[in-house]
Image (cartoon, rainbow, N blue to C red):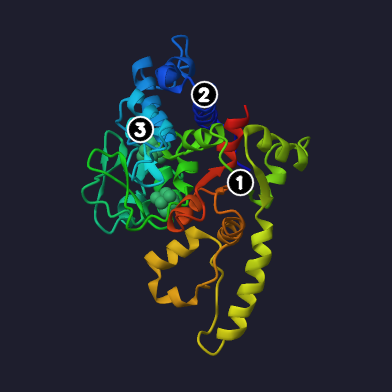
Amino acid sequence: MSQVTEVVKIRRKVLSEIARLAFEGKLQDHVEDILHTVVTEEGPRYRCCVHKERAVLKDRINLALSQPINTDLKVAAQNALEGKIADMPFVNVLPEACDRCPIDKFIVTDACRNCVAHHCINSCPKKAIAVVQNRAFIDKNRCVECGLCKRSCPYGAIIEVSRPCERACDLKAVVAGADRRAVINYDKCVQCGACKIACPFGAIGDRSVIVQLIQDLKHHKKVYAIIAPSFIGQFGLKVRPGQVINALKQLGFYDVQEVSFGADIVTVEETKEFAATVPGERSFMTTSCCPAFVGMVEKHLPELRDKVSSTVSPMIATGKSIKVDDPEAIVVFIGPCIAKKVEAARYAGVIDYVLTFEELAAMLV
Ligand code: SF4
Ligand code: SF4
């Protein structure tokens, strides 16, 4: 279970402040106040100074408004209030927040005793280790990061350190840029958000459309919430499903439906597709419900593309059904997963907005 760390608390505070100001109609005039309400002169301080904290926060606010990172905050607020969404990826590195974690993978620690056997020196196939000032020293220019020295040391004095963002991404889509800041390679990235969860500096985030949605709610448009079944466990043990639905209606949603409705449609359609194509046309078939999985197949395993079901996901099936019944509907998917934002973008006109549960919670504060 993920922890509610300071990173999470700050992210939630930014979202809830933005939502509050948007509901109160004060965002345009007061967006810069967030810099002072979330980061106060008294602290707590996580970076070198209050100015650095606020520079990071500015990046965070822009992302929460779905505007490019360096946008003036008043301009960003105006754009968001007008419903504008910048053409940018969903998962982004916040350059000011990235702490440029070390890239040296193998490090000799104080546990090194400069022993007589020197297994580390003997094990290194590149002769990258020497003794300097009574301790083993790894020459980074020679090291090929094979890890043999780490395994050879009887004291466990050589440790392997990896950048949390890079370690989290199995697709190797996060790399160190020239200045050591994290850079996402979008040719490989499927925008699953694993790196966002992993970064202990909160330096990777997903962009949000809460302001654009709040404007539609305030204008009394017919906004439908379609909510993932996992909402049951998202708001604490004491919160009953009916309370969540009532809360959504109090926010201004016209109606609330559960995406399990679409899941039933998908079950029937995928069963038909499977029966019709396996094993005749293909040896196996996977579902298409997870956009990160589909993206991974498209970008990394294109030879398996025809094995992925062509049936849409429950989110899309539910959205389509609502749009057929009510052409004026604005459909908002609410669920646990960032990657659903990517899927919705592919089906423009079916799903208008995607919120994570965290974003919804910020609107309810
Ligand atoms: S984990 Fe990655 S994104 Fe986070 S601060 Fe370190 S290098 Fe930057
Ligand atoms: S694939 Fe996922 S973990 Fe890798 S960079 Fe993209 S969002 Fe981050």
Mark 2 or 1, nearer chain start:
2
User: Label 3: few (<14), some or many (≥20) within 10 Å?
Assistant: some
Q: Is residue 32 visible?
A: yes
Rounded to the nearest whole Å, what is the CA distance between mark 2 and mark 1? 24 Å
Residue 48 is drawn in which quadrant?
Answer: top left
Residue 159 is drawn in which quadrant?
Answer: top left
User: Label 1: few (<14), some or many (≥20) within 10 Å?
Assistant: many
Please name the amino acid that badge 1 sits on: Tyr
Q: Quadrant of ligand 1?
A: top left
| Above or below 170: residue 20 | above
Residue at the bottom extreme of this rendering: 280
Residue situated in front as seen by the camera: 166 or 314: 314
Mark 1, residue position:
224
Please name the amino acid that badge 3 sits on: Asp
Report whether the residue tagged 3 is closer than 8 Å to ligand 1: yes
Q: Look at 61% across and 46% down and name the residue there.
A: 224
Residue situated in front as seen by the camera: 117 or 357: 357
Image side of residue 23 versus residue 348, left or right: right
Please name the amino acid that badge 2 sits on: Glu
Q: Look at 32% across and 52% down and name the residue there.
A: 185
Mark 2 or 3, nearer chain start:
2
Report whether the residue tagged 2 is closer than 8 Å to ligand 1: no
Rounded to the nearest whole Å, what is the CA distance between mark 2 and mark 3? 25 Å
User: Label 2: few (<14), some or many (≥20) within 10 Å?
Assistant: many
Image side of residue 38 versus residue 68, left or right: right
Q: Look at 56% across and 63% down and name the residue there.
A: 313
| Above or below 114: residue 26 | above
Per the image, label 2 sits on a secondary structure element best described as helix
- Asked whether the beta carbons under mark 2 and mark 1 sit within 8 Å of each other, the answer is no
Residue 131 is drawn in which quadrant?
Answer: top left
Q: In the drawing, what numbered circle is on residue 99?
A: 3
